[in-house]
Image (spheres, rainbow, N blue to C red):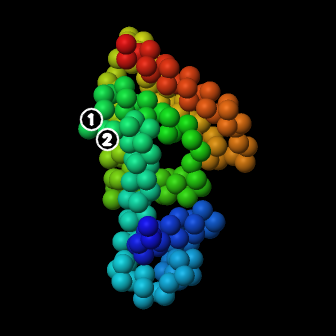
Amino acid sequence: MRTSKRTQILEAVARVVEREGVKSITFDSVAAEAGLTKGGLLYHFASRDDLVQAIHQHLADQWEASMVEAAGKPASEATAAERLTAYTRVATQSATRAELLLMLEGSTTAEHVAPWNAVIERWAPPPAPAIDDPATLDRLIARLAADGLWLYESLTAQRLDPDLRQAIAERLASTLSRDAD
């Protein structure tokens, strides 16, 4: 199946951000990376803001698709435990520099953070504050551990052995499934 021009452009944006950071998103840099003309970009995105908003949505959609795959169903059909387990499994995978930079940059702008927050709300909403409930604390600890692993590998040059990363993911998932019983 051929990649649409819009998807081709958004993948080019991600590569530009991966190499040069969010500030480097310009029509010229993206057009060159995508192998298109600036006019071709303007056909799909009327402004840089439209392009930046679209990359946030595109990456958030990919992130959610990974969770749907991990759960074997959409969030609306999954139990709370299944959603958090899928979130944890996906979060224990390495993020790209582009994802990290865009999430950080996006957190300062309500429109940019909205796609990311929508995914989090569907898959791993914050637990109700119940510090006396060990299962609630375990779920929060598992989520924080998964987020921490995602961040660790995004910020350092060190990569965990894939078997170790998988063992961590399984341990977190088993913690969550134990709490669901």
Question: Is 133 placed above or below 83 here?
Answer: above
Whether residue 10 appears in this view of the structure is yes
The N terminus - image quarter: bottom left
Residue 149, image x and y in percent?
Answer: 59, 36
As drawn, the residue found furthest toward the front would be: 1
Q: Amino acid at mark 1?
A: Glu
Residue drawn at x 38%, y 65% is: 53
Residue 70, image x and y in percent?
Answer: 44, 38
Q: Is residue 124 left or right of residue 151?
A: left
The local secondary structure at tag 2 comes to loop
Q: Amino acid at mark 2?
A: Pro
- Residue at which label 2 appears: 74
Q: Is residue 2 left or right of residue 16?
A: left
Residue drawn at x 30%, y 28% is: 79
Which one is nearer the viewer's eye here, 34 or 16? 34
- Residue at which label 1 appears: 77
Q: Is residue 123 left or right of residue 176?
A: left
Q: Tags 2 and 1 in contact by the CB under 8 Å rule?
A: yes
Image quadrant where residue 108 sits? bottom left
Question: Is 3 placed above or below 176 here?
Answer: below
Residue drawn at x 37%, y 33% is: 83
The C terminus - image quarter: top left
Whether residue 131 appears in this view of the structure is no
The residue carrying pointer 2 sits among few (fewer than 14), some (14 to 19) or many (20 or more) residues within 10 Å by Cα, namely some
Question: Is 46 placed above or below 129 here?
Answer: below
The local secondary structure at tag 1 comes to helix
Which one is nearer the viewer's eye here, 47 or 177? 177
Image quadrant where residue 57 sits? bottom left
Residue 44, image x and y in percent?
Answer: 36, 78
